[in-house]
């Protein structure tokens, strides 16, 4: 039996004697009984082996072979464990050394349950305790520093919570643990096999030959404790990881709740915006009908009336005004009548083309009959022609009509109402005509229309290169201004400014 199982056993003295063969030393041995089974010895029954042992005993030294048998008696408060060893001579020993291990009696006291002095837990020592804080031995409170703890002096058990100490033998938890442990200890152990007995005898003989040699036993308890500590540490890591996942899940759940609320608010705003858009569409339709009605009144009533009034006024003022004044007034009135006529026909309803020239430049206007087209020639060493174009969708002319106004160096600026990248059909028609006339497009990097993401204001040039960009600080009638830069030395010849 392992002494660790019965920590409080008291060995009862029994006579043990060890002597050499033929020695005169007295041997204190108990008297052998007539029954060999009671003595716990194993005898040789084979005559062949018996004769061989006698011949070796008489002629040569012999080796001792030890066999062991256990014979438990009835267990009680004074439980007894009996162990006896019999020696059989072996012919390989150098000298006959009979060794006798007599029976030993042990008295067993009740098992004392091991209680940790740190956490008051059952079944482990303080150095094996995994609890960080210390448990008070009286009130069982968890404390960080025992020296700074103020105990309430109310006795409380850490196991069952009753008013007794945690080490008390009356605790029902300790009683149950002791009973369970005693039941495991007193459980009958199966008899060892023959092979295990032979190995045990061989190891015992080797120990007899070398008394200083100790049997190497693996530290099973230490290995198990290390594995348990490692398992507890891993479980603690898993617990921390689960806590972190739980916290993240709570945050994600809160985020989803806020997202759903935001989605509901956005949905309400979209519904409100949709309703506002529908109302705006109805208003646009309503005001468009009014505008169309006013345009019809102006074009069919006011314009003819003013035309007749201007003609009567011109005919009546021919005899009153000076010839020069009359001529200028007549030209302006005729020009105004032409503009009103174009407005009635749908051409240039939102304005025309205007080119402003600084005073230090000499220019010459080229006569052009196309509506919304203005052509100027800059006088210099090399002649440069600038064309201003406004080409609405309702224009009455085609791109080929501009061919007769092109020169060697020509730049066409204007609002073409054609996006070269998005308007496939219109862009193909314009680019086809420009390629035939060797005109290259120069477009800004940003959209020029404020109502759409389109580039409709740019330049076409031949025989000259220009730089063009948007000027977002200035916009005219839902258009951003497009600035084109020409080098004077390249465009007009002479030194550059």
Image (spheres, helix red, strand yellow):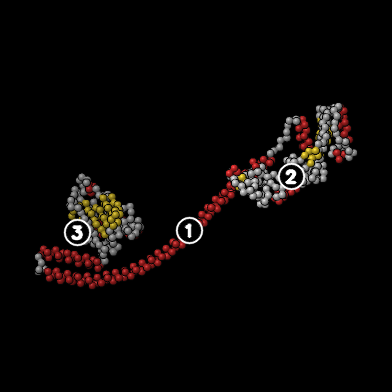
Label 2 SS: loop
**Residue 255 image position (x, y, % from top left):** 49, 56
Residue occupying image coordinates x 30% and y 56%: 480
Q: Is residue 278 above or below residue 209?
A: below
Of marks 2 and 3, the one in the foreground: 2
Ranked by sequence position, the earlier of labels 1 and 2 is 2
Q: Is residue 199 above or below residue 170?
A: above
Label 3 CA crowd tier, 10 Å (few <14, some 14–19, many 20+): few
Foreground: 357 or 431? 357
**Residue 114 image position (x, y, % from top left):** 69, 44
Of marks 1 and 3, the one in the foreground: 1
Q: Is residue 87 above or below residue 281?
A: above
Alpha carbon distance from label 2 to label 3? 128 Å
Of marks 1 and 2, the one in the foreground: 2
Ranked by sequence position, the earlier of labels 2 and 3 is 2
Q: Which residue is mark 3?
A: 367
Foreground: 416 or 272? 272
- Res. 422 image quadrant: bottom left
Ranked by sequence position, the earlier of labels 1 and 3 is 1
Label 1 CA crowd tier, 10 Å (few <14, some 14–19, many 20+): few
Q: Which residue is mark 1?
A: 258
Horizontal side of residue 485 vs 267, given as left or right: left
Label 2 CA crowd tier, 10 Å (few <14, some 14–19, many 20+): some
Alpha carbon distance from label 1 to label 3? 69 Å
**Residue 158 image position (x, y, % from top left):** 65, 49
Residue projecting furthest to the front: 153
The numbered dot on residue 111 is 2
Residue occupying image coordinates x 19% and y 57%: 366
Label 3 SS: loop
């Amino acid at each position: 039996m392992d002494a660790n199982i019965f920590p409080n056993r008291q060995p009862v003295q029994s006579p043990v004697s060890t002597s050499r063969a033929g020695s005169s030393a007295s041997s204190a041995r108990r008297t052998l009984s007539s029954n060999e089974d009671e003595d716990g010895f194993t005898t040789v029954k084979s005559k062949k082996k018996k004769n061989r042992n006698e011949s070796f005993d008489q002629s040569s030294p012999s080796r001792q072979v030890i066999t062991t048998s256990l014979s438990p008696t009835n267990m009680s408060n004074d439980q007894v464990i009996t162990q006896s060893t019999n020696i059989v001579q072996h012919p390989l020993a150098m000298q006959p050394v009979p060794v006798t291990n007599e029976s030993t009696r042990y008295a067993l006291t009740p098992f004392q349950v091991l209680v940790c002095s740190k956490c008051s837990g059952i079944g482990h020592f303080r150095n094996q305790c995994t609890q960080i804080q210390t448990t008070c031995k009286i009130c069982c409170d968890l404390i960080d520093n025992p020296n700074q703890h103020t105990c309430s002096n109310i006795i409380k058990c850490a196991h069952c919570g009753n008013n007794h100490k945690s080490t008390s033998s009356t605790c029902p938890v300790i009683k149950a643990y002791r009973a369970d442990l005693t039941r495991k200890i007193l459980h009958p152990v199966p008899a060892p096999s023959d092979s295990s007995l032979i190995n045990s005898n061989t190891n015992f003989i080797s120990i007899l030959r070398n008394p200083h040699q100790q049997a190497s036993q693996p530290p099973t308890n230490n290995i198990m404790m290390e594995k348990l500590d490692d398992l507890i540490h891993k479980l603690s890591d898993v617990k921390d990881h689960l806590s972190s996942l739980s916290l993240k899940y709570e945050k994600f759940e809160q985020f989803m709740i806020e997202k759903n609320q935001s989605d509901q608010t956005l949905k309400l705003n979209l519904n409100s915006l949709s309703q506002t858009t529908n109302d705006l569409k109805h208003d646009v339709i309503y005001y468009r009908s009014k505008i169309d009605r006013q345009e019809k009144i102006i074009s069919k009533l006011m314009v003819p009336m003013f035309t007749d009034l201007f003609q009567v006024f011109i005919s009546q003022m021919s005899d009153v005004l000076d010839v020069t004044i009359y001529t200028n007034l007549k030209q302006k009135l005729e020009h105004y009548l032409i503009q009103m006529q174009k407005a009635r026909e749908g051409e240039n309803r939102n304005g025309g083309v205007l080119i402003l020239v600084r005073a230090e430049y000499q220019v010459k206007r080229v006569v052009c009959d196309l509506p919304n087209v203005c052509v100027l020639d800059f006088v210099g060493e090399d002649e440069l022609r600038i064309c201003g174009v406004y080409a609405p969708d309702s224009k009455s002319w085609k791109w080929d009509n501009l061919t007769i106004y092109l020169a060697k160096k020509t730049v066409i600026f204007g609002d073409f109402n054609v996006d070269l990248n998005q308007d496939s059909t219109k862009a193909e028609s314009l680019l086809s005509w420009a390629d035939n006339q060797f005109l290259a497009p120069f477009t800004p990097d940003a959209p020029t229309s404020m109502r759409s993401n389109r580039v409709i204001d740019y330049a076409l040039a031949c025989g000259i290169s220009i730089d063009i960009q948007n000027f977002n600080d200035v916009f005219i009638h839902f258009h951003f201004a497009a600035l084109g830069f020409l080098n004077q030395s390249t465009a007009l010849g002479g030194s550059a400014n």
